[in-house]
Amino acid sequence: MADPAWRSFVPGASVPVHIIVSRKAAGVYPDRDNTVAAAKAYLDGIADRLGFNDRLFAAPTVEFIPLINGRFLFQIGGAPR
């Protein structure tokens, strides 16, 4: 879910994006560039649902966490955790 703080951004300001990645049980972590590339379609959909152009997203930051079934979690707005 989007951080409610994203609504407080000034029009034209960039919206922070933080991607949290968990690897699959039998896999390795992807590299950061491939993580961002793989997330592009999701970010397009998230921006569409939030009602703004995805060009407002800042360059995503990526964090790798321990095993949780290979999920990508997106934090939109606010500071990365």
Image (spheres, helix red, strand yellow):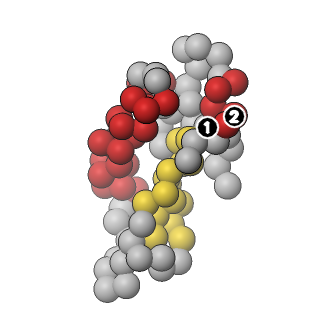
Residue 68 on image: x %, y %: 48, 76
Q: Which residue is mark 2?
A: 5
Residue 71, by quadrant, is bottom left
Work out how far the residue at label 2 is from the one at label 1, CA to CA, in angstroms. 6 Å
Instruction: Between residue 58 and residue 69, name the one nearer to us.
Output: 69
Chain-order first, disc 2 or disc 1: 2
Mark 2 and mark 1 in contact? Answer it, CB < 8 Å.
yes
Pinpoint residue 46: horizontal percent, then vertical percent: 43, 38
Residue 62 appears left or right of 41: right
Q: Find numbered disc 1 in the image and state the secondary structure of the residue it sits on.
A: loop
- For badge 1, the amino acid type reads Gly
Residue underneath mark 1: 77
Give x and y (percent) for residue 31: 36, 62
Q: Do we see residue 23 in this rendering?
A: no
Q: Which mark is residue 13?
A: none
Give the secondary structure at mark 2. helix
Residue sitting at x 58%, y 13%: 11
Pick the residue in front: 25 or 46: 46
Q: Is residue 30 above or below residue 13?
A: below
Q: Amino acid at mark 2?
A: Ala
Vertical arrangement, residue 58 with respect to residue 79, above or below: above
Residue 54 on image: x %, y %: 41, 28
In the rendered image, is residue 31 in sight? yes
Furthest-bottom residue in this view: 26
Number of other residues with Cα within 10 Å of mark 2, as a class: few under 14, some 14 to 19, many 20 or more: few
| Left-right relation of 27 to 2 | left
- Quadrant where the C terminus sits is bottom right
